[in-house]
């Protein structure tokens, strides 16, 4: 009897990669990969949540005044105030008196 290729498999624990069916190999690898991906996704969500909480509770209060100043400056930059310049209005009699006082 050849030990590398048994004619009868007595239990599932004696199965090897070489005497298993293709579908059982496929499903085992599929479920192993799916489980690993699902575990990685759950860990990713946990780390993102922890990072978000640290950012909001620790970092954001320190940076909030600077962010507000930046937002105010950007508001001024996008909508600058307009100044209306007007020529001074002189009365001609006042202008003549001014010229007489200076000697012209």
Image: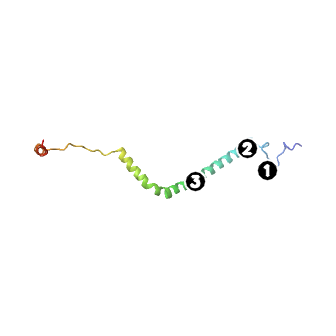
Q: Residue at x 81, y 49 (%)?
A: 14
Marks 1/2: CA–CA distance: 14 Å
Circles 1 and 2: CB distance less than 8 Å?
no
Nearer-N-terminus badge (3/1): 1
Colour option used: rainbow
Which residue is the site of mark 3?
Answer: 47
Numbered badge on residue 13? 1
Q: Residue at x 68, y 45 (%)?
A: 30
* Side of 66 relative to 38 (left or right): left
Marks 3/2: CA–CA distance: 33 Å
Along the viewing direction, whichever of 65 and 87 lies nearer the viewer: 87
Along the viewing direction, whichever of 102 and 93 lies nearer the viewer: 102
Q: Position of residue 76 (x, y in %)?
A: 35, 47
Which residue is the site of mark 2?
Answer: 25
Q: Position of residue 3 (x, y in %)?
A: 86, 44
Nearer-N-terminus badge (3/2): 2
Q: Position of residue 95 (x, y in %)?
A: 13, 44
Q: Residue at x 27, y 45 (%)?
A: 83
Q: Position of residue 50 (x, y in %)?
A: 55, 56
Along the viewing direction, whichever of 63 and 27 lies nearer the viewer: 63
Marks 3/1: CA–CA distance: 38 Å
**Which image quadrant: the C terminus?**
top left
Q: Quadrant of residue 99?
A: top left
């Amino acid at each position: 009897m050849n030990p590398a290729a048994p004619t009868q498999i007595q239990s599932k624990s004696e199965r090897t990669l070489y005497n298993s069916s293709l579908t059982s190999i496929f499903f085992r690898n599929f479920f192993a990969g799916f489980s690993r991906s699902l575990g990685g996704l759950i860990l990713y969500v946990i780390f993102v949540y922890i990072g978000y909480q640290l950012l909001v509770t620790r970092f954001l209060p320190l940076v909030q005044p600077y962010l507000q100043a930046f937002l105010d400056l950007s508001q001024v930059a996008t909508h600058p105030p307009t100044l209306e310049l007007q020529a001074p209005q002189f009365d001609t009699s006042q202008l003549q008196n001014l010229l007489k006082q200076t000697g012209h």
